Every structure is written in C-alpha cells, then in structure tokens.
Image (cartoon, rainbow, N blue to C red):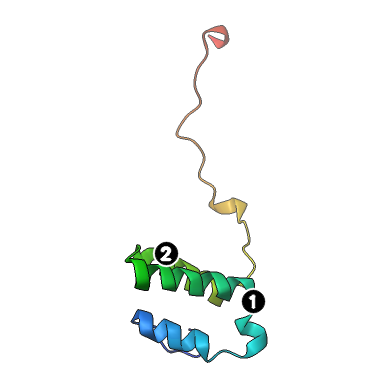
Amino acid sequence: MPDGRKLVTLRDAATYITKLPKAEHAAPEWQAAMEALLLVADLGGPTMFARIGVMRAINRHVARVFNPDRKDTHWGRRKLARDR
C-alpha cells in the first residue's frame, strides 16, 4: 500500500476500497478491482484475480517503462545451409 499498510484478507481490501474518496472510487481500475473481489467472495473464483485487480488499481499512476538493456539475447543464431 502507498501508506505502508498491507492488505492481508479480502475484507481488508474491500474496506480499503469503500473508504476511498468518491472521485478515486469511481476510477475504472477500482471498479474492476471491486468486481474481481466480488467474483472471488461470492462465487469462489481464483483469489489471484482479486490480487491482480487491486495491485493494478493501486499502481495505476505508475508508468511502465521498457528497459532494452535487460533484454537477453538468444543463446545462438541458427546456422543456415547457405551460410556454410
């Protein structure tokens, strides 16, 4: 969490979402997170869906940056018959 707390249970996540300001609460990311929480709580869906929804909503203002230095090259190039 941005303030240092941790969401341990689904109830913690639900109370956190309901206590958000109205403008932030209406954001599409938080709406999707609430939908995922309801799916897990009511229908017994995979808890990973709820976790992913909440994490995406919390980090929605963080820009994802591609770092080309981290890209690993392939182990080796395939050798063609014409290059022999």
Q: Which residue carries the number 2 mark? A: 49
Q: Nearer the viewer, residue 44 or 75?
A: 44
| Residue 65 picture quarter | bottom right
| Element assignment for label 1 | loop
The percent position of residue 68, horizontal first and vertical second, equals 61, 51
The percent position of residue 9, horizontal first and vertical second, equals 33, 81
Residue 75, compared with residue 52, is above or below; it is above
Lower sequence index among marks 2 and 1 = 1
Alpha-carbon distance for marks 2 and 1? 18 Å
Left or right: 68, with 42 as reference point: right
Q: Residue at x 32, y 66 (%)?
A: 44
- Near mark 1 (Cα within 10 A), the count class, few <14, some 14-19 or many ≥20, is few
Q: Nearer the viewer, residue 71 or 57?
A: 57
Type of amino acid under label 2:
Phe
The percent position of residue 15, horizontal first and vertical second, equals 44, 88
Q: Which residue carries the number 1 mark? A: 27
Residue 51, compared with residue 70, is above or below; it is below
Type of amino acid under label 1:
Ala
Q: Nearer the viewer, residue 81 or 32?
A: 32
- Near mark 2 (Cα within 10 A), the count class, few <14, some 14-19 or many ≥20, is some
